[in-house]
Image: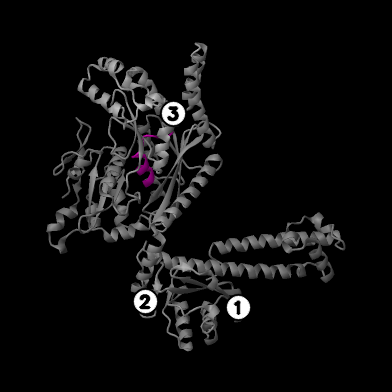
Amino acid sequence: MASEMRENPEEGKPVAVGEASVAAPGDAEKLDAALVQAPAAAAAARDASSAPSLAEQVALVPTDPGCYLWKDAKGNVLYVGKAKNLRARMRQYVQLTDERPMVPRLMAATASFDYVVVGSEHEALVLEINLIHQYRPPFNVDLKDDKSYPYIALTKGDVYPAIKYTRERHRPDTRYFGPYTDARAARATIDVVRKVMPLCVATCAEWKRVRRQLEAHPEQTDVVALAQAESGRPCFDYHVGRGPGVCAGCITPEEYATHVSQVERFLAGHRGEFVSELKAEMAEAAAELDFERAARVKRRLAVIDGLDDKQRVVLGSAQDVDVISFWREETIAGACVFVVREGRVSRTCEFVLDKGLDVGEEELASGFVKRYYDQTSDLPLEVCVPVELADAETLEGWLTARRGRVVELHVPKRGQKAHLAEMARNNARHYLARYELRTGYEDKRTNEALLQLESALALDEPPMRIECFDISTIHGKHTVASMVVFTAGKPDKSQYRRFKIRAELDEANDFVSMSEVLARRYAPERMADERFGARPDLLILDGGKPQLTAAIEQLGKLGLDIPVAGLAKSDEELFVPWDEMPVVLPSGSASLYLVKRVRDEAHRFAITFHRELRDKAMTVSILDEIPGVGEKRKRALRRAFGSMKRLREASEEDIAAVPGIPAEVAREVYETLRAWDAELDSSRERAADGDDGA
């Protein structure tokens, strides 16, 4: 039986009565000791026939807040989550009432679980972040690139804090700004900061010498400073105005602390107050006739003005906002963060996440917010995310505790922030494209997909040429078929073909339509026609058993042996002629993404052709249906407007102004065209809902 964690009323900490003693969220070294073993772990030694099911084990889980860990048969952590009520949340998994697509795959791989009970939902969030960081579960959202990102750091634990570029693990006595996804940008920022406000750099040999002396004699700070003034060696940075002169005893710790405070505000993007202080200092120096100091301050202000020219204003007021957006592709996603301080974009950060379409948008956003803000101390007062988050209140509490002021999560719908979110989304898309090009991701995924299809469909070789057919119709009218071709896993649009179905149909009949189009495509004269390309390695039909049956019969009549499969729309299953049971490609696999992409492209191409024919037919016949409009008046309207599109955009007065068109006829033309537009819009809405073809 799993030991339970209960709150100790004397200490206010979650305590386990039994195996684990104390669960301290945030203490990674004690996390393993704090994990409460689920009943499955205790049942491992029992006979398999008497082992309780996961549902029975979950029924014994407490209803307290905490974190749960789903594990596979080897004990590897697959997924980490948090809950206000552990039993209720975990029951959603085992009963498959959680509608996220990844849940069935997760539970199919799950053999046991652990859980940790904590005192509050906020503690559960902190523990969840630590557990994900520790175990890196494959079903949780995480950064694709496992490298450590660069930061700008201030060594606040020193008497004279220095600025440095670093990738080190965060230390409690150092303040970090970042992360920066561009190392050059981080180094350039340090260079700009030291032009604006002289500060020691951590790589300076003289600063290190002074630091060693202060560490050796911490109680004699004034004596060390005096010794530097008498016998110190000024560094090169001091001579060029980028060092404050610590090595030469030219600045006291109190004056240096003022520099550090100003640099902190500058790096945090809060430059307004800093600029005001510099202007006041310049005015004071000028009033005292200290023109050399006034000139130095003026040069610093010029550097800041140059930054303002590069950082355009994106918000009307001086707001501190982080705008987060994503671009998702298959199993990866690009994330972009616009860091807006005082209404200006101070920097942009881009990341690649190792989950794309595998998880819902809400979980993707929530997971990224936890991962990103666990690594940075630069928190705004508002975080814009692309979707409402179920745990928004808990996240806001966590961010508020880290920031020290209220932080809100917001989903922008319109206005400047919505426009900024769209810009961030475009940046995420471009960054992901650059990542794919740099790493060869698309080629790897394509090769993997072709090999998986070869194995799943029992093909002789990878399907280098895939042809897919789709039928589009409305109640048998304007029935068309599309053929799309993918060569080496990529669309080959020069090989696309469109067919008008010649059979007289009173209603939609996919069996007849598919038989006709296959007979025409794979007729001997077409197979010999170089314009139709080579024989396909795999034929995919958009549909299930009926379409597959039609294809098998038609190919048999033609004496062709082409591997064929029908992709059902509902469950994304592939029906094959050699097995009664459909082939189910693994969810999230490269092969499933490829066949769905082929199917969707065939559907898009068919729908486009169908709309063209339907619109053309309506355009030709619409004027014939208007009373009072004969051949002569049709020619007059065509000469006046040049196209049907311009005629549809014309007003009633414009139509009446055409020579030979009476006012009452102009009214009839105008009203008929409005009714036609309304019908066209309605049919397009039906097509978007899936009624435009089978």
Residue type of the residue flagged with mark 1: Asp
Q: Which residue is mark 1?
A: 506
Q: Earlier in the sequence, mark 3 or mark 2?
A: 3
Q: Nearer the viewer, residue 371 or 495?
A: 495
Q: Residue furthest top?
A: 288
In the image, which is nearer the foreground, mark 2 or mark 1?
2
Measure the alpha-carbon separation of dots 3 and 2: 63 Å
Identify the residue at image location x=48%, y=79%: 534
Do the residues under discs 2 and 1 have CB atoms within 8 angstroms?
no
Residue type of the residue flagged with mark 3: Lys
Residue 93 higher or lower than 580, as above or below: above
Residue type of the residue flagged with mark 2: Glu
**Residue 244 at x, y = what percent?**
37, 22
Q: Nearer the viewer, residue 256 or 686?
A: 256
| Coloring basis for residues | one colour
Residue 33 higher or lower than 355, as above or below: above
Residue 379 covered by magenta stretch: yes
Measure the alpha-carbon separation of dots 1 and 3: 80 Å
Q: Earlier in the sequence, mark 1 or mark 3?
A: 3
Residue 255 higher or lower than 477, as above or below: above
**Residue 456 at x, y = what percent?**
34, 72
Q: Which residues are magenta?
A: 367-380
Q: Earlier in the sequence, mark 2 or mark 1?
A: 2
Q: Nearer the viewer, residue 214 or 447?
A: 214
Q: Which mark is residue 195?
A: 3
Measure the alpha-carbon separation of dots 2 and 1: 42 Å
Secondary structure beneath label 2: loop
Q: Which mark is residue 461?
A: 2
